């Protein structure tokens, strides 16, 4: 039993899966849920995901040993300000957000003395949302990025690592700013592109969708992801994301030029370069 | 037994799967393979995919009742010119290419009197290639678009439909030009984008790939597709594809503007529109 009492702020797919995994592996005794939708919290309690719930985050955090932020990242700062006076000395605050960087610094600055923030980002979830899709197994075999800074308490860090290791995740420790550069490229960029592909279809002729094959289905799966979550991620990681988007547009324009010029040799070269890199994934 | 003798020009993933399915459903007696790589043809014969092979397409087509073009679409015209003198009266020429439109017209014009071209495009395959991945089941449950024109012989059309129905495909009859507008949008566009995403990663930092999750894996799966096939498809369908790419770039730029302006409301609206369309796939 690692923790007596934990609080989940934001009981959606990830928050509820975290709660289920904490119970499954007996890492805590009691789970309090918090969120803006009382109906959802009630349902989570009925399903045994949480033991009780509180409507106000400041109330939900009283006496908690571990507080998990699993709301959209845009809500973190406001909620952190609210719960600050209720946090008990020795508590650990952690999260599952897709943005770290400056957000980690701001969260750290909002912690009262004796409370440590440890940033974490499980690479799981994506197109499903809500507690109905939650599962204690969601994080098993998935990567989990943990982003300690020079201010992170070593003991708190070890406890957060222990949680994710117990869930069966593959832990990677990455510096918060580097995390944001990486995920701007390998996650935030493809999400924005998938959304843009769907809106392109809407502009041209959405009845064409019925002719799409597995390639289209796979390429656009992440366009089913939560607009609210992704709106926040894009804005909070905008500098890195805009840079990635700029490089993407240059690469796309290069291919467009080859197509316009019917330049078969350059086109095949560009495609072959892309394929070689894609086929290498998971082989090192 | 629908056909005595058939010729497969281009024994790759699709050509070999077609051959295996023809044998499985006993739709022909004898299969001749043709292609530019003798080693591959030898291997296809050893594996029982084809019964014999010929290095020259004009020899491979002598006395055949059905000729399948399953090479990259850019090779069709040259090969059609070569085989023209060997085609027997009553033969059906068909294909599995991803481009139709003008190509169907050109192929029709190259057919000798008494020989009909019937365009077909099974929506299967994509990132795998080569005979080792071939399967008689590849087309089962997949869509197959057949693109008759006003010149298509009705009897030949029925026989081609019969083949794909027997393979378990869902047949759709579409006019050749409309086929190319549809697939520029729902297939050729996402392929070009997937290639451009991989080249973006290469430009920024390909070591970041080891942090990618399932979303990235799915979004870029089709970047493993054959550069040679896709080079030809992009060039032969360039007018439609460039239009789709132009609309895509406008949609992407709209999202980029919202991100740059931290316009959360517009961003969420654009993402929600995309999600609604994506979630609707397969539900009508």
Image (cartoon, coloured by chain):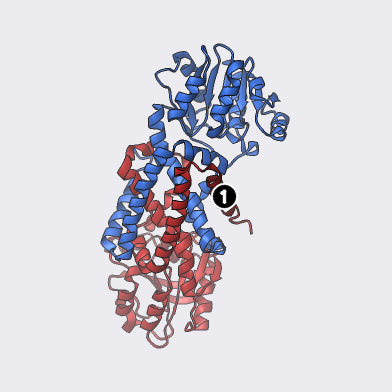
Chain colours: A red, B blue
In depth, the one of B124 and B108 nearer the eye is B108
> Residue A95 in the image: x percent, y percent?
42, 71
Q: Secondary structure at mark 1?
A: helix
> Residue A115 in the image: x percent, y percent?
42, 84
In depth, the one of A56 and B116 nearer the eye is B116
Residue visible at 42% across and 17% down in the picture: B151
Residue visible at 36% across and 54% down in the picture: B252
In depth, the one of A55 and B234 nearer the eye is B234
Decide: few, some or many residues near mark 1? Use Cα within 10 Å; few <14, some 14-19, many ≥20. Answer: many
The C terminus of chain A sits in image quarter: bottom right
> Residue A251 in the image: x percent, y percent?
47, 54
Residue visible at 43% across and 22% down in the picture: B148
Q: Is residue A12 visible?
A: yes
In depth, the one of B144 and B77 nearer the eye is B77
Q: Is residue A10 visible?
A: no
Q: Image height check: is B31 above or below A87?
A: above
Residue at the outermost left position = B265
Residue at which label 1 appears? A275
Q: Image height check: is A234 above or below A198?
A: below
């Amino acid at each position: 039993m690692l923790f007596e009492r934990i609080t989940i702020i934001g009981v959606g797919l990830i928050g509820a899966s975290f709660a289920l995994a904490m119970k499954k592996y007996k890492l805590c005794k009691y789970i309090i849920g918090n969120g803006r939708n009382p109906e959802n919290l009630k349902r989570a309690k009925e399903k045994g995901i949480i033991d009780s719930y509180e409507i106000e985050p400041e109330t939900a955090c009283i006496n908690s040993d571990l507080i998990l932020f699993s709301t959209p990242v845009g809500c973190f700062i406001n909620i952190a300000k609210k719960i600050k006076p209720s946090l008990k000395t020795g508590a650990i605050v952690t999260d599952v957000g897709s943005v770290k960087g400056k957000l980690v610094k701001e969260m750290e600055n909002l912690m009262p003395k004796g409370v440590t923030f440890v940033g974490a980002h499980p690479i799981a979830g994506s197109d499903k949302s809500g507690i109905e899709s939650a599962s204690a197994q969601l994080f098993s075999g998935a990567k989990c990025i943990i982003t300690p800074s020079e201010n992170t308490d070593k003991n708190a860090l070890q406890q957060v690592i222990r949680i994710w290791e117990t869930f069966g995740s593959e832990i990677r420790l990455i510096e918060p700013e580097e995390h944001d550069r990486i995920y701007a490229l390998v996650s935030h960029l493809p999400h924005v592109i998938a959304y843009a592909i769907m809106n392109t279809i809407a502009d041209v002729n959405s009845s064409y969708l019925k002719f799409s094959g597995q390639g289209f289905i796979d390429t656009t799966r992440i366009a089913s992801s939560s607009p609210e979550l992704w709106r926040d991620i894009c804005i909070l990681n905008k500098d890195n994301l805009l840079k990635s988007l700029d490089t993407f547009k240059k690469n796309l324009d290069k291919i467009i030029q080859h197509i316009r010029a019917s330049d078969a040799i350059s086109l095949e070269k560009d495609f072959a370069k892309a394929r070689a890199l894609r086929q290498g994934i998971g082989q090192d």
